[in-house]
Image: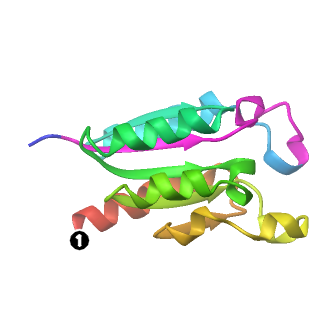
Amino acid sequence: MSQAKVLVLHGPNLNLLGTRQPEIYGHETLDDINNRLYEKAAFNGWEAKALQSNHEGALIDAIHAARLDGTAAIIINPAAYTHTSVAILDALNAFDGKVIEVHLSNVHKRESFRHHSYVSLRADGVIAGLGSQGYLAALDALIKAADA
């Protein structure tokens, strides 16, 4: 039996985690978050692959590839594209697996333009405001759903 695969997508500016606005986003780096996800996935018999891009098209290309490579689920933090990208929504709508949207900060406590998410229209779940724990909670939810 093959391992379940999860694709973790990180949107623009998340490569700066640990140094960019740590009062909002914390001190962990993206590598810290990804390494915790890789460990948790492997411990549970899953394979995790992560990609960060500041380019919308690269995120869309990764979603398209996930449609064909056996990926069971996507965890996505679209960052600023959350509020602007119909193209990412369209790509996610073409993906048949589970999708969980994650935000490090509580977007509902921030500027009003951050309160709207195009991605939420497709997401099976949304986690916001838990910091990096949100990614792990998303992976937990996917693992438990697959075991059910």
Q: Which quadrant of the rendered structure holds the C terminus? A: bottom left
Q: Which stretch is magenta? A: 3-23
44, 93: nearer the viewer:
93
Position of residue 3 measured from the top left corner of the image (x, y, whole percent): 21, 41
Identify the secondary structure beneath mark 1: loop
Residue toward you, 49 or 143: 49
The part of the image, by quadrant, that contains residue 108 is bottom right
Q: Is residue 24 left or right of residue 64?
A: right
- Front residue of 86/81: it is 86
User: What residue type is disc 1 on?
Assistant: Ala
Left or right position of 1 against 102: left
Which quadrant does the N terminus fall into? top left
Residue 115 rendering spot, x and y as whole percentages: 78, 70
Q: Within the magenta stretch, is there residue 90?
A: no
Q: Which residue is labeled 1 in the image?
A: 148
Up-down: is 103 above or below 57? Answer: below
Residue 12 in the image: x percent, y percent?
71, 38
- Would residue 19 appear left or right of 100 to someone viewing this image? right
Residue visible at 61% across and 28% down in the picture: 31
Q: Is residue 100 left or right of residue 129?
A: left
How is the rendered protein coloured? rainbow
Residue 26 screen position, x and y as percent: 80, 44
Residue visible at 38% across and 56% down in the picture = 94
Residue shown at 61%/53% (left/top)? 133
Q: Residue at x 54, y 38 (%)?
A: 59
